[in-house]
Image: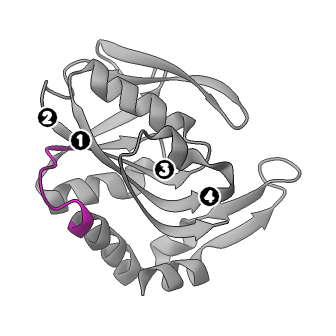
Amino acid sequence: MISERLLKTIRHIDNFPKPGVGFKDLTPVFRDPALCRELVNTFAADFKEGVNVVVGIESRGFFFGPSIALELNAAFVPVRKKGKLPYTVHSEAYALEYGHDILEMHTDAILPGETVLIHDDVLATGGTAEAVKKLVEKAGGIVVGFSFIIELAFLNGRNRLDGHKVRTLVTYN
C-alpha cells in the first residue's frame, strides 16, 4: 500500500526549520521511481473525472503537480510567491506557520468555469491551500478538490477547505 511505503521512505528531521518543529522530508521519495509513479497514479485515479487544470503550489507542489496534470490530460498552472511571475497576476495574502506571505497566479492561467485540482506536498494549517483556492476563484475557476502527500492532522488544516474533497496519502496525528 502506498501509504505504508511513503511512511517508510519519508525522512523525519527534528528541529528544522526551527527548534520544536519536526520536518517531513520528501526528498528520499524521489530516489524511488516506482513509488513516484504510484503516487501520481493514485492522485490521478482519485480525480480522474472532470479536472481541467492542476494547480501546483510553490515550490514543492511543482514536484508532482505537472505529472498529475499529464496523467489527467489537464493543464498545469504554477502558483508562486510574490514577484516571481512575469505577467499580470491575481494576488492573495495569507498567513502561514512561520509568518505571512503573498501568492500570485497569472490572470489568464485559469479560464472561467474550468475545474481545478489544487496540489501541494503538505497540508498543515490550511492557510496556503485556502489562499490558492481564493486565487482560483478570482480567476473564475471551480475548485473540485485538493491533493496532498502529507497531512499534519493535528493542525486541523482540512477544516479551512470548505468541505471540498481532500486526498492525502500519509497522515500524522
The amino acid beneath tag 2 is Glu
C-alpha gap between disc 3 and disc 4: 19 Å
Residue at image mark 2: 114
Q: In the displayed orientation, state which residue is furthest to the top.
A: 88
Chain-order first, disc 2 or disc 3: 3
Q: Nearer the viewer, residue 141 or 77?
A: 141
- Please report the residue visible at 23 percent of the width from the left and 41 percent of the height from the top: 116
Q: Secondary structure at mark 3?
A: loop
Chain-order first, disc 1 or disc 4: 1
Q: Position of residue 19 (x, y in %)?
A: 89, 50
Chain-order first, disc 3 or disc 1: 3
Residue at image mark 1: 116
Residue 112 magenta: no
Vertically, is 49 above or below 76?
below
* Quadrant of image for the C terminus: bottom right
The amino acid beneath tag 3 is Arg
C-alpha gap between disc 2 and disc 3: 23 Å
Q: Residues within 10 Å of mark 3 (few under 14, many from 20)?
A: some
Position of residue 127 in the picture relative to residue 38 (left or right): right
Q: Position of residue 9 (x, y in %)?
A: 57, 80
Q: Are marks 1 and 2 in contact (CB under 8 Å)?
A: yes
Q: Nearer the viewer, residue 49 or 63?
A: 49
Circle nearer the viewer, 1 or 4: 4
Q: Are marks 3 and 1 in contact (CB under 8 Å)?
A: no
Circle nearer the viewer, 3 or 4: 4
Return the mark for residue 92. none
- Please report the residue visible at 56 percent of the width from the left and 65 percent of the height from the top: 26
Return the mark for residue 60. 3
Q: Secondary structure at mark 2?
A: loop
Q: Residues within 10 Å of mark 2 (few under 14, many from 20)?
A: some
